[in-house]
Image (tube, rainbow, N blue to C red):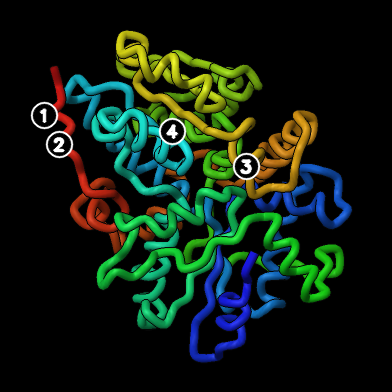
Amino acid sequence: MDMTQLENVLANKDIVKVVQMAPSTRVGIGELFGYEPGTPLTNKIIGAFRKIGFDYVFDTTFAADIVVMEEDMELEQRQAAGGPFPLMNSCCPGFVLDLERDFPELRARNMASTKSPMETMGTLIKTYFAAKQSIPPEKIYSVAAMPCLVKKLEARKPEMMLEGNMAAVDFVMTTVELAQFLKSKGIDLKDCPESDFDMLMGQSSGAARLFGASGGVSEATLRYHAHRHNKMLTEPVVSELRGFQNTREIKFEIDNREIKILVIDGILNALPILKNEAVRREYRFIEVMNCRGGCIGGAGQPPATPEIIDKRKKGLYSLGEKAAYADSGENPAARELYNDFLGEIGGEKAKKLLHLAEVSWKAHDP
């Protein structure tokens, strides 16, 4: 781990230092400081970020709400066109790389074009936040604390660059790297004062906080999709999506249309389905997370047993239950972003900033 670049930036008073934090980091890092696995340490970590010199601290789950809304629009467009199905999530960079390498036709035809929450937040930091604060985006150094090693590669992909070949995310550090960096500075989370996220993009729904657990993306999407269609879920928790089975599914009817969702843990468990078009077409949405349990079991997290991963998952669920808003559509900060900056969900500006270059998937229809 070479943190020299980050050290130099934190010491540079001419640079605005901004960091975002993924939900899995806040339930994984505590194990390295003597906490019980799965203990949510959101405010302690924010305090630590401010102590080492970050000027602003943002919540990646705010961007997860935006991703839910944009991906749901993609789903609605496919529903109206009669396909192609399924729509596949784009938030797991390992899964995206697997599709690019082994199933390029599925990458073009079925992958959601919406960027991941990390890249969405990075983009908004250097556009929306920069404009609000009257800061030239080139003066902003954007850091992401993530549970995933592959996020380092995602941040460097050419298609993630903004205008002027500027990275949306300049530096990615894993949960383990963050803990090591804090310890190198003599900082113990137990001794850190608590602090809060900066408020411009500091609110998120309970659904968005579940993104770090396998099934969380699907649950967040279903909650918002139901909300948009004035459909009340029989329970706020979609329990069918929260198990530890390798594959899990749920059927849900909205406006006389069946929404069938499949969640898969691990690319090896996904291969039989990725290779079988007839089975794939049964589903409207498929979520694949390459790591066991989702991002909470990511390669950038402390090593974990299944029991520890289960505790981290429960920690995420507890964060979701404490949120003031159940689904993405209820988040007032998200509505403010669209009203003041992006315009319509799935509109021209949102497409330009928050989506990868669109593929004409209709041309691939049989």
Q: CA distance from mark 4 to mark 2?
A: 23 Å
295 vs 17: above or below: above
Q: Nearer the viewer, mark 1 or mark 4?
A: 1
- Mark 2–mark 1 CB contact (< 8 Å): yes
Residue position for label 4: 221
Residues packed near mark 3 inside 10 Å, few (<14), some (14 to 19) or many (20 plus)? many
Q: Residue at x 63, y 44 (%)?
A: 299
Q: Residue at x 30, y 55 (%)?
A: 159
Q: CA distance from mark 2 to mark 3?
A: 32 Å
Residue position for label 2: 360
Q: CA distance from mark 3 to mark 1?
A: 36 Å
Give the secondary structure at mark 2.
Answer: loop
Give the secondary structure at mark 4.
Answer: helix
Question: Is residue 259 among what the camera can see?
Answer: no
Residue 165 drawn at (x, y percent): 29, 69
Q: Amino acid at mark 4?
A: Thr
- Mark 2–mark 3 CB contact (< 8 Å): no
Q: Amino acid at mark 2?
A: Ser
Q: CA distance from mark 1 to mark 4?
A: 26 Å
Q: Amino acid at mark 1?
A: Ala
In screen coordinates, is 198 left or right of 167? right
Q: Amino acid at mark 3?
A: Gly
Q: Which label number is shown at residue 298?
A: 3
Q: Residue at x 26, y 69 (%)?
A: 163
Residue 248 drawn at (x, y percent): 54, 17
- Looking at the image, tell me whether mark 4 or mark 2 is earlier in sequence order: 4
- Mark 3–mark 4 CB contact (< 8 Å): no
Q: Nearer the viewer, mark 4 or mark 2?
A: 2
- Looking at the image, tell me whether mark 1 or mark 4 is earlier in sequence order: 4
Q: Which label number is shown at residue 175?
A: none
**Which of the 4 quarters of the picture holds residue 358?**
top left
Residue position for label 1: 363
